[in-house]
Amino acid sequence: MYGIAQNAKRLIRKKCFNQAAVAEKAGYNYKTFNNMLNGRKVITDSDVARIANALEVEPNELYGIKSQ
């Protein structure tokens, strides 16, 4: 099972998104977002909602929960 950061990285690659663009769309500067994805900053529930919105997915996808 992957963590939120790993799932976010996977989705960024899968959707061919640019990490800096996702950070901006989620309302973070690049350094803060990069720190989240690399485990240097804790990702909170509110961060999950913002990141999911920027990635155009449901938050459950970041948690690794498959929808029925």
Image (tube, rainbow, N blue to C red):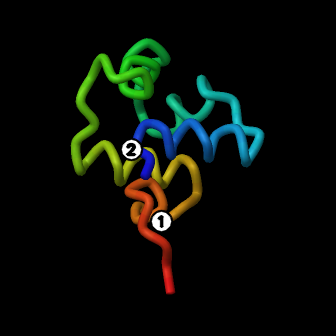
Which amino acid, mark 1? Glu
- Please, which residue is most extreme toward the bottom here? 68
Say which residue appears at 73% left-offset and 47% top-offset: 15
Q: CA distance from mark 1 to mark 2?
A: 15 Å
Q: Which residue is mark 2?
A: 3
Considering only vertical position in the picture, is 48 above or below 29?
A: below
State the image coordinates of residue 30 (x, y, percent, origin top left).
49, 17
Left or right: 30 in relation to 11: left
Specify the quadrant of the image occupied by residue 18: top right
- Do residues under tags 1 and 2 come within 8 Å of each other at their CB atoms? no
Considering only vertical position in the picture, is 54 above or below 25?
A: below
- The earlier-in-sequence mark between 1 and 2 is 2
Considering only vertical position in the picture, is 13 above or below 65?
A: above
Name the element at disc 2.
loop
Say which residue appears at 48% left-offset and 54% top-offset: 53
Question: Crowdedness of circle 1 by 10 Å Cα count: few (<14), some, many (20+)?
Answer: some
State the image coordinates of residue 5 (x, y, percent, origin top left).
43, 37
Q: How many marks?
A: 2
